[in-house]
Image: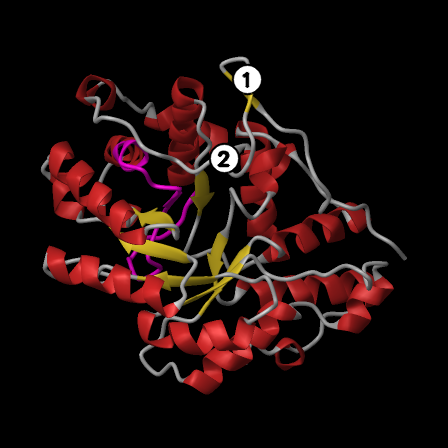
Amino acid sequence: MSVPSTIGPVAVPMANGKPQPHNIRNPGMALDLDWVRGVQVNTSAVERRTASLPGRRSVKKDWQAAWLLKAVSLIDLTTLSGDDTENRVHRLCRKAMQPVRQDLLEALGMGDRHLTTGAVCVYHEMVPAAVRALEGSGVPVAAVSTGFPAGLSPLNLRIAEIEASVKAGAHEIDIVISRRHVLTQNWQALYDEMRAFRAACGDAHVKAILATGDLQTLRNVARASLVCMMAGADFIKTSTGKEGVNATLPVSLVMVRQIRDYLDQTGIRIGFKPAGGVSKAKDSINYMVLMKEELGLPWLQPDLFRFGASSLLGDIERQLEHHLTGRYSADFRHAMG
């Protein structure tokens, strides 16, 4: 059996009539408060749009397997627990380099593909262990930073944490914004904070975690997304995974629409990362359909789209085995370490 390939190159999108290569980082722009304050969100329209997603694209059989394999390549395989150890991180990294059992890949006709996850995401203290374990694999290391998850450490300490993670070898930094700046509509403070974080990251890509469950309204989510992109964020990310409400389709649609508007105005493509609550294979397909319909095929590549997840991979592997055998296997057969 072989599945349709979904991992090859895709066409480069156009912005302002010009082709935009994937590797252009977001340099940011001056804060445009008129643009920010002009952003509004029609909540009922957002809810209607996202409610229709699961039924709009019914992906079955071999095509479903292909989409799930694509989803594997988009996962930021994550461990953010207080009891993390170097051994746990090492096992997680081994799983990131071989996320799906080889016998399943061969049965799907994908045995010769070098399938890995999009990245491994850990706390700063575990960055050196992850870098050593992933050396030569091509899988980047992402570090959560800036007083994750609350983001309430003094600014100088948050910047120092970013610099320490970059020095330790992290390729990507997931920063947490100060939610109070959004709740008080202090867009200048949010912009200045994000600019400082972007500068501290240097060559490392920066993902701005909005913690959308704390922002109260979709309008706040939209405006915070825009300000972070103006300040130079390479990705915008829904959640830390520690809030009461994490990634949802309505919040994701609002953020994705801001990415589209920013692209239209600047020609710069920003990545998106839903995190927290995306634990089932069927959920991953819904998010991928959203990205394809709203932004196009380039946003189904790991340089522009990631899932922040710890348990999603296990469910995808179970679904792939069910596709091949017609039976669901026990969870322990797809252990995450």
Q: Residue furthest top?
A: 17
Q: Which residues are magenta?
A: 227-248
- The percent position of residue 177, horizontal first and vertical second, equals 22, 49
Residue type for callout 1: Lys
- Give the residue type that dot 2 points to: Ala
Residue for point 10% across, 59% down: 154
What color scheme is it? secondary structure
Question: Which residue occupies 40% across, 75% down?
Answer: 128
Q: What's the mark number on residue 210?
A: none
Residue at 41% x, 30% y is 259
The secondary structure that most of the magenta stretch takes on is loop
**Which tag, 2 or 1, sits closer to the chain's start?**
1
Instruction: Inspect this view and state whether residue 119 appears.
Output: yes
Residue at position x 66%, y 70% in the image: 98
Q: Which residue is mark 1?
A: 18
Residue 305 drawn in magenta? no
Asked if residue 31 is positioned above or below residue 77 in the image, the reply reads above
Q: Which of 233/70 is in front?
A: 233
Vertical position of residue 251 compared to residue 141: above or below: above
Q: Is residue 238 magenta?
A: yes
Q: Is residue 130 left or right of residue 184?
A: right
Q: Position of residue 333 (x, y in %)?
A: 67, 80
Residue 276 in view (yes/no): no
Query: Which element carries disc 2, helix, strand or loop?
Result: helix
Determine which of the numbered discs, if any, sits on residue 51 in the image: 2
Q: Horizontal placement of 217 versus 91: left or right?
A: left
State if disc 1 and disc 2 touch (CB < 8 Å). no
Quarter of the rendering containing residue 296: top right
Element under label 1? strand
